[in-house]
Image: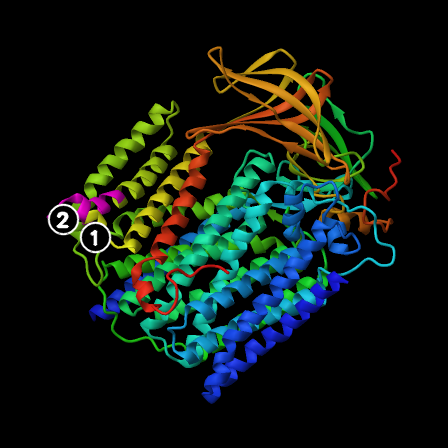
Amino acid sequence: MHPVRKQRLLIVLAIVVLSSIAIGLLVFALRDNINLFYPPAKFSAGEVPHDVRLRAGGCVQPGSVVRDESSLEVNFQLVDPTGKLKVQYEGILPDLFAEGEAAVVNGVWRDDKVFYADQVLAKHDENYMPPEVAEAMNNGEMHQATCEGAEYDS
Amino acid sequence: MIPELGHFALILSLALSAALFVVPLWGAYRLSQPLMLAGRSLAAGQLLMVTVAFVILGWAFLHDDFSVSYVANHSNSLMPVYYKLSAIWGGHEGSLLLWILMLSGWTFAIAIFSRSLPLDMQARVLAVMGFVATGFLMFILFTSNPFDRILPLSPQEGADLNPLLQDPGLIFHPPLLYMGYVGFSSVFAFAIAALLTGKLDTAWARWSRPWATVAWAFLTLGLALGSWWAYYELGWGGWWFWDPVENAAFMPWLVGTALIHSLAVTEKRGLFKSWTILLAIFAFSLSLLGTFLVRSGVLTSVHAFANDPDRGLFILVFLAVVVGASLLLFALRAPVIKNAPSFNLLSRETLLLANNILLMIAMITVLFGTLFPLVADALKLGKYSVGAPYFNLTFIPFMTIICLLMGIAPESRWKRTNGSPLAKVVSGPAVLSLALGIAVPILLGDFAFSMVLAVFIGSWVGLTTLWDLWRKSQNSQGRWVGLRKLSLSYWGMIIAHCGIAVSVLGVCLNSHYADMDKVRMDVGQPVTVAGYQFTLEKLEQVRGPNYMADQAVVVMSKDDRVLRVLKPQKRRYFASGQIMTEVALDPGFTRDVYVAMGDKINAQSWAMRIHYMRFVRWIWLGALMMALGGMFAVIDKRYRKRKSAASPTPQEA
């Protein structure tokens, strides 16, 4: 083969090989590391798979936050207009986590119907509402997109 | 009255930037010298007007003019003066104004420092800058005017700046980052001007190279500062979160890194011309994409200030126009690739090409991870989030290969390199790196193969670079003469590559050896974390200028010797009622100790997080070295000769 063509072929091959590795890694990494979001309503309806990493979000029901006296375990409930989700988390909650405010959690939903969160995200400032949560609150009968307007009858 | 003057100044600068876009371009077309020269004055006028607007916004902040809605939303009379001033860019409108100020500064700098350029070339470069400025000024005037008033019922008190931003980090991080971000617009302008004239020679690469390097150095500094700020301010104990907004600034950095390397090939060897042009277009497009992601509110992030679909749409359209038009121009005008590649398969050209390909692939994986949730959402596939493990898994392998190649690249020669002498040269550093790779994890007390690899790679980059310096500084008149004979741009490369080595070591060692404990701390009861004793002495209340804080006094000691008294705080800001954790740090060259208050358990005890962050400072030290290396490369006298009419360094205005 002509040396120039051979060189060009090798460069192209290198690009192809590297890109394939990249795509392979990408697909492999995506499989385990993307988290689908579910609102509490889906959990109540039982439409959420167990034992898979996922993301949930809603408003923290006032009065539901219970801290363990001896450890750093916290239990609370996330609600949206039609559903409820029990969450357990061990660790320190973010500064802006509060009852009656929006929160998003990452973790696994186990067979005992408790969501074991390893990460709790709260809003970044006063007026901020996670878009997923805002949408979840809007899908139901209520039309307010904030947690303040929500009615918490338990 | 005064804020209206600011608004008026912005309108005037829009008129000037529109003229800057049209007049020199028309002049270059008609070959009219006065019209082309007008670009310089227009650039100066635009900078002046934008500066006036910026100063007036600052005046409104200083005088607590809460009738200006932007000031009312981002300031408070209790805030210290320096935060009032840095609050100018603490929100959407003001940071956009800073963007435009930077852009005008770069435009003016081009007008001043590239007088040695052919006049028509300079005119076209300035016109492209004028086009970008026009777009952004229209954006600020039509969708996000910082001078909007709340009249007649203006508030008596401001809503306060987001407490996360009330930190010295805000003073420096956005300006530095924007310097870099916006700086790529100058390289973009050079690329477009070259495509317009059709003169894609090595001179083009020589002109744009210093600008690209300066922009890249500033972006490096801005990213490092942002990472350091997030590390101590967000209080999560991390320094990089693969947050979409971090990615938005990181992607231009990756492409910018590819660009400064490919510019080297284009300047020295006249190769990869079209590729370099394309990279310049990509770097700026990614800066615009970053602006879109951050400013449109499509992302959930600390940086997302506002949620306004109009704004997003405007930037998206502008992005489409810029990218579409420049790619079209590229397709029409890009030089035809010559037939014979005039370099061998093992040569510096190939290695730099590999650097470019790898950086681009890494950028694309980051881009994919960043945009995937947005695209999935838009296509109604569900609401996804892509986590940090994805990025680590896809990004690290490519960085590993880059680092391996980086060791041999400085030793290689242009055109062709012989394999066996090269292997002989790098065998010494390779053996030494392997020894270090095995020794360091053992010394640190936790042996892991991933760390052997990590330390090997970090040391490999550092040692091969230093070895190259050692070899190239050999001189018959002695080492000192040899060292002084090396060019500044060579020194720049050495420093920047050593910076990579330091950062790589910091990142890897920190990721494995950092330790974190969430502990319950009771007054008087010591806890032990990572060999240090921490005793909560007392809990107290302190008052700051615009907040009250619960403060814990924690004594940190080792072997009964007190090392430091740490005072982490949990602040409550008056105006917004927001709670903020203020961490306490004991910094050190090989480790940071970091205490953050978590939740109050009762009057005598708090849940706290104690981080033992090993080698975390190295990450930013390395980035500082990279930026310093970039600056060294720019002040090389090669570029000064070309610009004899102007002062030596391209400086920001």
Is residue B192 part of the magenta span, yes or no?
Answer: no
Q: Which mark sits nearer the N-terminus, 1 or 2?
A: 2
Q: Which residue, as the protein is rendered here, is positioned at the far left?
A: B476
**According to the image, label 1 marks what residue?**
B485
Front-lying residue, B446 or B581: B581
Q: Is residue B281 visible?
A: no
Q: Which residue, as the protein is rendered here, is positioned at the far bottom?
A: B30
In the displayed structure, B27 sits above or below B364; it is below
Do discs 1 and 2 belong to a common subunit?
A: yes
The image shows residue A124 at horizontal and vertical percentages of: 69, 43
**According to the image, label 2 marks what residue?**
B475
- Callout 1–callout 2 Cβ contact below 8 Å: yes
Disc 1: CA contacts within 10 A as few (<14), some (14-19) or many (>=20): few
**From the image, which quarter does the N terminus of chain B lie in?**
bottom right
Q: CA distance from mark 1 to mark 2?
A: 9 Å
Front-lying residue, B166 or A121: B166
Q: Is residue B646 left or right of residue A3?
A: right
* Type of secondary structure dominating the magenta stretch: helix
In what element is the residue under mark 1?
helix
Magenta range is B466-481
| Residue type at the position of mark 1 | Lys
The image shows residue B592 at horizontal and vertical percentages of: 48, 29
The image shows residue A16 at horizontal and vertical percentages of: 37, 60
Front-lying residue, B117 or A105: B117
Q: Is residue B610 left or right of residue B628?
A: right
In the displayed structure, B135 sits above or below B486; it is below
Report the chain holding disc 2.
B
Query: At x 63% / y 52%, what residue is drawn?
Result: B89
In what element is the residue under mark 2?
loop
Task: Specify the quadrant of the image occupied by residue B267.
Answer: bottom left
